[in-house]
Amino acid sequence: MLTLFLILYPAVAAALLLIVKGERVKQVALVAALVELVGAVAAFAQFQPDASSQFGFDYAWINSLGIRFSAGIDGISVLLVLLTGLLVPFIILSTFNRQYDRPALFYALMLFMQAALMGVFTARDGFLFYFFFEVALIPIYFLAAMWGGENRVPVTFKFFVYTIFGSLFMLVALVYLYYQTPVTDGHHSSAIADFYQLKLTPAAQGWVFWAFFIAFAIKMPVFPFHTWQPDTYVESPTPATMLLAGIMLKMGVYGLIRFILPIVPLGVETWGKTAIILSVIGIVYGSIIAIRQRDMKRLIAYSSFSHVGLMAAGVFSQTETGMQGALIQMLAHGVNVVGMFFVADVIFSRTNTRQLDQLGGITRTTPKLTVYFMIMLLGSVALPLTNGFIGEFLLLHGVFTYNHYLGLAAGFTIIFGAVYMLRMFQKSMFGPTSVRTGTFADLTSSESLVFVPLVIMVFWMGIYPQTFLKVTEPAVVNLMKYIGTSAVSLK
């Protein structure tokens, strides 16, 4: 029942938050998110490292069609449940020095999105997964459209059209899989576990692969489905950008692992290399574009695009190290990208600009911001003993094992990442002060409180990654064995 609590509680809290008035909204929203965090930590702490689904529930939903309201947490989803519970309270805390119109609706949408994300990462029914996958789009759309920048209307419309378009492909694939399952008690099954048992023809696996891949590639995004991402990240209010980059894009990577690899292994054998090539192109392309950016938020957006390309490549490498790397890197990237976007927000709140050529000299008066900024940056560029190093090492090992040349090309992410991140730090923090940075104030207490847990996670994951790897390993090993066995049996 813990999983049911994690899904329903944020939605109920969001509804109740709408009746709260005044400045108390922030505090109530934070308390609600912290309660969810306690639940997510409890799920992680009590999780038994094996390949089973735990803390689950199963109720009839659309009984005439055999669709169940069924969810649980396993080794593939447990880190994402932890990530979703961990980030939201600190995203809310990051807004304490900001003012937003209609605050009750603003924070209610954030909590409602958290509920949908929990549903995505725990669903055991294909149509329930699709339901939450689509529901998660609603709050982020309104957050961007109502509190975004000057170009928010066309940008959010483009984002909405892209994601809905991709999701239609997934829906077609799910309906097809549903009708391939045997009839039991007068109806087919939409349980994801039953989809795994299907013996689809190679031709069917090919088109199902692309139907799922397009949906998930748009959400991550993977080249060339990325064009909605930079503008949406820049125009959205920073809390919405944090939700998008920190958690929402992980839905796509999670979908690759949960659906594509085990359901269509022959499709992966045929088209997986194409997917890896597209992912590697995105790694290099996103990094080069990031180097040329002058806007901090847009630079971080392209950085995120590059990093997620490496996660997708690691998944399609079909190696245990690549899969483990993708799971732990989703957690690490979520922590790092939220920290980096918050740095950009802090700087913007004091200078009213994110343009690097208008900044400089900030470090002279901001020892706390300087330290936190550098730690989050080093995690992002995968310095050893930081969280980014563990995930990227495993991912690159997986891709290199799959194909040496693709692994070498993917390795450029570390070099390019150091270039654009250190360039951003140097231009914003060092050098002479500008008109905008001459009176720059250091972090407030609430702003420091946002960074402290993120910094703890950077070093905890970097120094003792086994805390997290041991939890996911049995499920990954079991999944890889199943994929290998299934592919052989279908040939």
Image (spheres, helix red, strand yellow):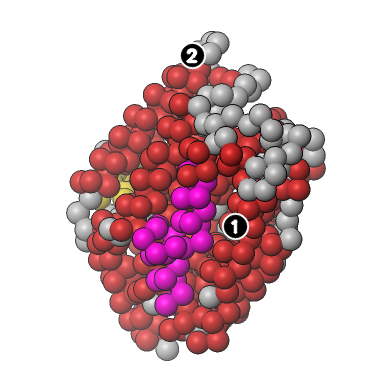
Q: Is residue 458 above or below residue 309?
A: above
Q: Residue at x 35, y 74 (%)?
A: 320
Residue 393, magenta (yes or no): yes
Which residue has dot 1 on it? 421
Q: Residue at x 36, y 73 (%)?
A: 321
Q: Earlier in the sequence, mark 1 or mark 2?
A: 2
Residue in front for this viewpoint, 79 or 56:
79
Is 36 one of the magenta-colored residues?
no
Residue 326 seen: no
Q: Position of residue 131 (x, y in %)?
A: 51, 46
Tell me which corner region of the image, top left, top right, bottom left or bottom right, holds residue 102.
top right
Three-letter amino acid code at the position of disc 1: Met
User: Can the viewer see residue 299 in this picture?
Assistant: yes
Q: Is residue 52 left or right of residue 97?
A: left
| Residue where numbered disc 2 is placed | 24
Q: Are marks 1 and 2 in contact (CB under 8 Å)?
A: no
Amino acid type at image mark 2: Arg
- Quadrant, the N terminus: top left
Above or below, 291 relative to 73: below
Q: Nearer the viewer, residue 297 or 24?
A: 297
Q: Residue at x 40, y 71 (%)?
A: 394
Q: Quadrant of the C terminus?
A: bottom left
Of badges 1 and 2, the one in the foreground is 1
Q: For numbered disc 1, what is the local secondary structure?
A: helix
* Residue 158 appears left or right of 75: right
Secondary structure that dominates the magenta span: helix
**Residue interval drawn in magenta:** 372-398
| Residue at the image point whose x is 42% and y is 77% from the top | 397
* SS label for mark 2: helix
